[in-house]
Image (cartoon, rainbow, N blue to C red):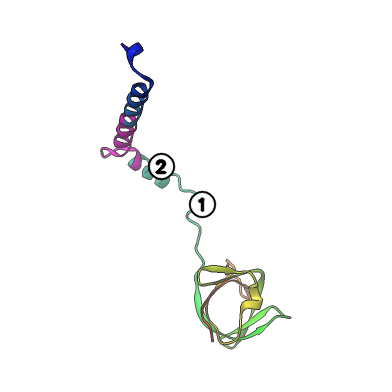
Amino acid sequence: MMRHLTTRARRALLTGALAGACALAQATAVSGPNGTAMQGRRSVVAAPVDGVNADRPELAQAVIEAVDLAQRQLRLRGKPVAVDANLRVVQGGTLVSQGLRALRAGQHIRFALAPGDQPGRPVVLVYIDQQP
């Protein structure tokens, strides 16, 4: 009987069979209380990955009072704060390529210090919220 079917008919039959198999597999993956989605959640809870749970930097707000390019420092809240050599500056959701040179006195910023507890940590990330 298959010999008499045309090539188009064979293709249509094969496409229909594949679509049915895909629909069945998709329904199986999420069905029931112990479906694949729940198994994935249990796996993550049982063996979390360090990178996913890493501490996120806390952002502080300030207004830049002065920028010292030679010393690689910002004056924030009356105190000089060192700036990391790999400083990332973000403005409007875009990474600014000039880095420290993009910062000016009077800008309202949010910033993050390098991770750790030691005093004198440098600024590693700056979000420019408002231009002067």
Residue 112 is situated, as x and y percent measured from the top left of the image, at 55, 72
> Is residue 36 toward the left or the right of residue 121 in the image?
left
Q: Quadrant of residue 18?
A: top left
Q: Amino acid at mark 2?
A: Ser
> Is residue 85 toward the left or the right of residue 129 in the image?
right
> Is residue 24 toward the left or the right of residue 124 in the image?
left
Q: Are marks 1 and 2 in contact (CB under 8 Å)?
A: no
In the rendered structure, find residue 43 and report the number of the disc placed on it. Answer: 2
Q: How would you rate the neighbour count of disc 1 (Cα within 10 Å): few for under 14, some for 14-19, many for 20 or more?
A: few
Image quadrant occupied by the C terminus: bottom right
Q: How would you rate the neighbour count of disc 2 (Cα within 10 Å): few for under 14, some for 14-19, many for 20 or more?
A: few
Q: Amino acid at mark 1?
A: Asp
| Whether residue 13 is situated above or below residue 118 in the rendered picture | above
**45, 117: nearer the viewer:** 45
| Whether residue 103 is situated above or below residue 89 in the rendered picture | below
- Mark 1 or mark 2, earlier in chain: 2
Residue 77 is situated, as x and y percent measured from the top left of the image, at 56, 86
Magenta part of the chain: 20-37
Q: Residue at x 30, y 30 (%)?
A: 20
Q: Which residue is mark 1?
A: 50
Residue 47 is situated, as x and y percent measured from the top left of the image, at 45, 44
Q: Residue at x 31, y 37 (%)?
A: 35
Q: Residue at x 49, y 49 (%)?
A: 49
- Between the C-alphas of marks 1 and 2, the distance is 14 Å
Q: Main secondary structure of the magenta part?
A: helix
In the rendered structure, find residue 113 and report the number of the disc placed on it. Answer: none
Image quadrant occupied by the N terminus: top left
| SS of the residue under disc 2 | helix
